[in-house]
Image: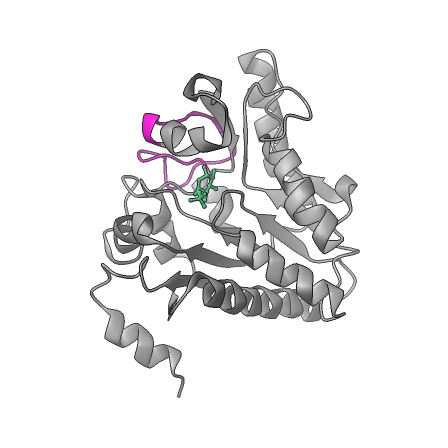
Amino acid sequence: MEVLVLPTPADVARRAAEVVLEGLAAAGRARPEAGPVLGLATGSSPLGLYAELAAAVRSGRLDLSRATGFALDEYVGLPVGHPQSYREVLLREVCRPLGLAPERLHVPDGSGRTEAELVAAAADYDRRIRAAGGVDVQILGVGANGHLGFNEPGSSLSSRTRVKRLSDRTRLDNARFFDRLDDVPTHCVTQGLGTVLEARRLVLVASGPAKASAVAAALEGPLSASCPASVLQWHADATAVLDEEAAAQLRNRDYYDASAAGL
Ligand code: GLP
């Protein structure tokens, strides 16, 4: 696991974009016949990173015209086209600015009317990821309670894409995107932690003081379902890109800085 600490959120976005670009280039070398497969997070954390990737597309350094995208999660029960559904968010923040074809954006289906429909669609999502050859680079944020995707504390470390209840903390955190707390869905469909772990490279971005304790638990606490983001420790190619505030509670900081300085 690599931990990179940068002064500001803008530096985090730039450095994380470099890590993603390296990962996509490696994917292109390993499988030149296939377009890259990008795992996409929502939330505010990756927005600066997406803006940096969009700049790379505009300058000709990155071409996502053959790429496929897989979202981490989706709310259950929002009407099609709802501006806060993660499909719409990703169409706005990723597909248009990065030139990713909307028909190659996959988002878990939260529109099922019955539990059976939702469960079947969730299982189908894992099949679709496999059929695409797996995710090359998975972009991640972290919730203030340590959630990854919508895997709330208590999620099985080997879970697959499935329907989950959102915690009160997450609903409160996300209420800022809705008119009222009551409008925030109670359930979601999220890639499981086992699904996320199958991506070939993980890139987590976090900034701001609200993430400091979750980041410390994820990177330096025990590998535990109590902190779903701690699965980063189990992955062979994971990079966390943090600003000073998000890194404030890390104990092993000197070592990370020395390692980042290179050989
Ligand atoms: C959201 C998403 C997560 C995201 C997290 C943090 O609810 N489901 O994928 O990483 O919460 O959000 P933010 O980046 O806005 O702090």
Residue 107 appears in the figure: no
In the image shown, does 21 or 128 lie closer to the viewer? 21
Please state the horizontal and vertical placement of residue 187, each as a whole percent of the image.
Answer: 47, 22
Please state the horizontal and vertical placement of residue 45, each as a whole percent of the image.
Answer: 47, 50
Q: Which residues are magenta?
A: 150-169
Q: Give the answer, above or below, for where 28 lies relative to 228.
A: below
164 vs 34, left or right, is: left
Residue displayed at 37% across by 63% down: 243
In the image shown, does 115 or 75 lie closer to the viewer? 75
Q: Quadrant of the C terminus?
A: bottom left
Q: Quadrant of the N terminus?
A: bottom left
The quarter of the displayed image where residue 119 is located: top right
Residue furthest out toward the left: 251
Can residue 155 be found in the magenta stretch?
yes
Q: Give the answer, above or below, for where 205 lies relative to 83.
A: below
Q: Main secondary structure of the magenta part?
A: loop
Residue furthest out toward the top: 114
The quarter of the displayed image where residue 232 is located: bottom left
Q: Give the answer, above or below, for where 95 lies relative to 220.
A: above
Please state the horizontal and vertical placement of residue 161, each as a whole percent of the image.
Answer: 52, 34
Can residue 203 be found in the magenta stretch?
no
97 vs 209, left or right, is: right
In the image shown, does 8 or 242 lie closer to the viewer? 8
Residue displayed at 41% across by 65% down: 8
Residue displayed at 37% across by 29% down: 172
In the image shown, does 180 or 115 lie closer to the viewer? 180
Residue displayed at 37% across by 50% down: 231
Ligand 1 placement by image quarter: top left
Residue furthest out toward the bottom: 263
